[in-house]
Amino acid sequence: MSKPGSSSQRVTKKVFSKIVGDKLSNIPRETLKLLETENFSYKIIKGEERDKLVLDIIKKIDAHDFLPRGKRKWVQGWREILKNFKKNKYDLRFLTPQYIKPGTQMRIFDEYVQPQSDDFELNWYKAFRFWFFKKYLFKVDNIYEFGCGTGYNLIILNSLFPDKKLIGLDWVPESKTIADQIAKTYKINTKGIIFDMLNPDKNLSIESNSAVITLGGLEQLADNYNNFLDYLIKNKPKICLHMEPLLDFYDENKLFDYLALRFHLSRNYLGHFVKSLEKLENKGRIKIISKKRTIGSKFHDGYAYIVWKPL
């Protein structure tokens, strides 16, 4: 990505279209409204301040502060979300995942930046999903989200596509409970299913004219994603969307990328998923529709995406 010209910047509609790699005319009104009404201004971190930030990142990685998260941690996290969701009378605002932290530094155009708004990352994620979902999901009848977590994405999917059937799948039982409660409270056509992507249930078939999506759902699989890929190819969804930290987009010869790469490896995040899909495409088993590195939070680029379909 090329650098902006000055230290003070804002994610405008033109900048957003450049970040996601799409024409300005394809940016939906929901995204445009957010870009116009929310504070997307930021300042590029330079000089001594940048050096301190880089040093802090290195020290945290070297101190092994970023241990891989096991299933128990996810159960605890989603159990906490479910508890707060119930406590606050099923207010959808309490479904925001804990990993979206207010006020954190971000990574944009190969620079570390400090947003003006504490809600910058949260609003970016909303704007991105409006675009991502409206661009690729409008033709399908059913949407399967694997690794649905707090059900956060099911809500935004229903706001965009109220007539589509939504299925939220996760290995954590609390995620199923949340999805089912959302359906009951808000009369949404969705349901939760317990599903382990490490050991896919071959008896669970994906309906025809369906899409599969993951948003940070694959990152915990490390190198153990091939069983899930085989499951998808066998079930032949119409389209597959993944927004994940994608290891193959980093250039280890650049400091900016190398730090993100080290963080990624320290967390044992998703392996060479892009390369695996490219090999499958070369074998004629799938077709890659698009792929792009976008922006990231302080430590890595978790908002990269790849879109493909089985053949």
Image (cartoon, rainbow, N blue to C red):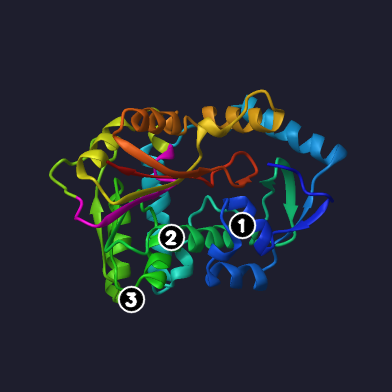
Seen in the picture, residue 184 relative to 117 is either above or below; the reply is below
Seen in the picture, residue 68 relative to 74 is either above or below; the reply is above
Residue depicted at 41% across the width and 70% down the height: 160
- Earlier in the chain: of badge 3 and badge 2, it is 2
Q: Which element type, helix, strand or loop, lies under badge 3?
A: helix
Front position among marks 2 and 1:
1
Q: Which residue is mark 3?
A: 186
Q: CA distance from mark 2 to mark 1?
A: 15 Å
Q: Are marks 2 and 1 in contact (CB under 8 Å)?
A: no
Coordinates of residue 57 in the picture (x, y in percent): 68, 34
| Quadrant occupied by the C terminus | top left
Q: Nearer the viewer, residue 1 or 246?
A: 1
Seen in the picture, residue 229 relative to 194 is either above or below; the reply is above
Q: Which element type, helix, strand or loop, lies under badge 1?
A: helix
Classed neighbour count for the residue bearing mark 2: other residues with Cα under 10 Å, few (<14), some (14–19), many (≥20): some
Labelled disc at residue 17: 1
Front position among marks 1 and 3:
1
Residue type (three-letter) at the residue carrying disc 3: Tyr
Q: Are marks 1 and 3 in contact (CB under 8 Å)?
A: no
Q: Is residue 57 one of those drawn in magenta?
A: no
Front position among marks 3 and 2:
2
The magenta-colored residue range is: 206-219
Q: CA distance from mark 3 to mark 2?
A: 21 Å
Residue depicted at 65% across the width and 63% down the height: 13
- Earlier in the chain: of badge 2 and badge 1, it is 1
Q: Which element type, helix, strand or loop, lies under badge 2?
A: helix
Residue type (three-letter) at the residue carrying disc 1: Ser
Coordinates of residue 148 in the picture (x, y in percent): 36, 53
Residue type (three-letter) at the residue carrying disc 2: Phe
Residue depicted at 56% across the width and 55% down the height: 22
Q: Which residue is mark 2?
A: 133
